[in-house]
Image (spheres, helix red, strand yellow):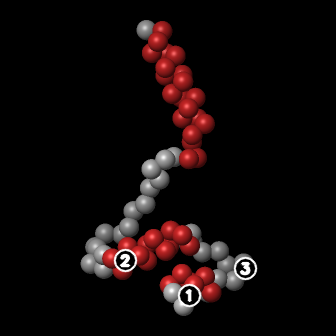
Amino acid sequence: MDDRERRAAGYSQGNVPVTPPGLDAIYSACRRLYPDQPNPLQVTALVKYWSMPISKVYQWVQKLLCSRV
């Protein structure tokens, strides 16, 4: 049984993990690759998928405002 299966087996239906399993798997792999890393892992999205419609509107408004000057 690998790390991921062992962690998943510990969760019941009502018990939700704090860290998503996919992200936890990435953390585990990084800890194995870089055991002496003193800093905690930091993760950020490269693409802000939660704000795309608003970002597109903002870009459009900026383009309009800049073209009027």
Quarter of the rendering occupied by the N terminus: bottom right
17, 29: nearer the viewer = 29
The residue depicted at 43 percent of the width and 72 percent of the height is 27
Is 32 left, or right, of 58 in this rendering?
A: left
The residues bearing labels 1 and 2 have C-alpha atoms spaced at a distance of: 17 Å
Q: Secondary structure at mark 1?
A: helix
Instruction: State the residue lying farthest toward the right.
Output: 13
Is 12 left, or right, of 51 in this rendering?
A: right
Instruction: State the residue lying farthest toward the top.
Output: 69
Is 34 left, or right, of 59 in this rendering?
A: left
Q: Secondary structure at mark 2?
A: helix
The earlier-in-sequence mark between 1 and 3 is 1
Q: Which of pointers 1 and 3 indicates the residue nearer the eye?
A: 1
Which residue in the structure is indicated by mark 2? Answer: 31
Is residue 57 depicted above or below 27 in this figure? above
Q: Residues within 10 Å of mark 3 (few under 14, many from 20)?
A: few
Which residue in the structure is indicated by mark 1? Answer: 6
Q: Residues within 10 Å of mark 1 (few under 14, many from 20)?
A: few
